[in-house]
Amino acid sequence: MRKALVVMALLVLGGCAPGNPGLIIGGVLAPDDACTFTASGAVRTIGYLDVGIPGNHYDAFLLYQNQLLNLSRNGVTGFPVMADPNVMQVEAVEVEIRDIGNNPLGFTGPNPFTIPSGGSAVPSGDGDAAGVGIGSAQLVPPAYVAELGAVAGDDATIVISVKAIGHTAGGAEVVSDEFIYPIQLCRDCLSTCLTDDMGENICLPACQPGQDDLHVACDATCRAGTT
């Protein structure tokens, strides 16, 4: 593992991304109880998306893993101080939305498509464990959600193919391997209103309303006595 990381680091210094990509998408992160996303947090194995909510979309916080080696130097005798050229900055993601048979779905808009994204990943500090970072990306934009019921079905499972695109601090272009993420569709399933025995609204908001977890709303759209 250490030898492979060193070889990839040398390739990046030479101005080209390695054939074995140094950037890996390690998963879609789930929030903690405070709705915070961290690189050490739990990773989802499947997502859920409510296609019945107008303007809904699917946003993901992606775990990035950087397999390149930290090449910075700071105070090493005989060598000048050097910033690490292997820090990775993600600038976009390429997304393709497919059916469960891995066939691209037909939308009015392009599929696959590339959208701007943000995120970074530090390199490996020891040559054994990959460095990590977090980035956010909208995997299913609202225009695509609006058409999913027609092109896939309200209760279908779709497959999202994702590739992250970016550069190292040293100027080398990096493209991750394909990451596959299934999403189960449903209609009017992830948002509801509940009241207690006194008729007062119960508030159990989800971190990302409209996706993954049930959102129990308590705003003006909810009325006493509704469930």
Image: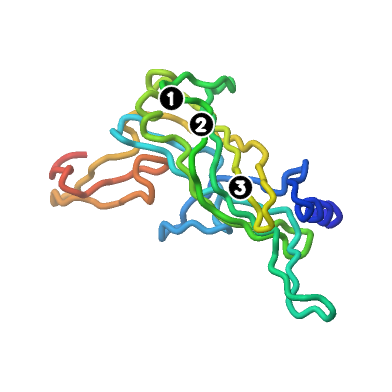
What residue is shown with label 1? Answer: 109
**Above or below — where is 207 with respect to 140?**
below
Disc ID at residue 178: none
Percent x, y of residue 65: 65, 52
Query: In the image, what residue occupies the spot 74% across and 55% down?
Result: 68
Measured in 3D between alpha carbons, the distance from the residue under mark 3 to the one under mark 1, in whole angstroms, is 24 Å
Percent x, y of residue 130: 71, 56
Quarter occupied by the C terminus: top left
SS at badge 2: strand
Query: In the image, what residue occupies the spot 86% across and 55% down?
Result: 3
Horizontal placement of 128 versus 55: left or right? right
Which of the 4 quarters of the picture holds residue 58?
Answer: top left
Instruction: Using a 10 Å C-alpha cutoff, classify the residue at mark 3 as few (fewer than 14 neighbours), some (14 to 19) or many (20 or more).
Output: many
Horizontal placement of 69 versus 218: left or right? right
Measured in 3D between alpha carbons, the distance from the residue under mark 2 to the one under mark 3, in whole angstroms, is 16 Å
What residue is shown with label 3? Answer: 166
In the rendered structure, which amino acid carries the disc numbered 1?
Gly
**Above or below — where is 168 with respect to 94?**
below
- Whether pointer 1 and pointer 2 mark residues with C-beta atoms closer than 8 Å, the reply is yes
In the rendered structure, which amino acid carries the disc numbered 2?
Phe
Query: In the image, what residue occupies the spot 70% across and 58% down?
Result: 86
What residue is shown with label 2? Answer: 113
Measured in 3D between alpha carbons, the distance from the residue under mark 1 to the one under mark 2, in whole angstroms, is 8 Å
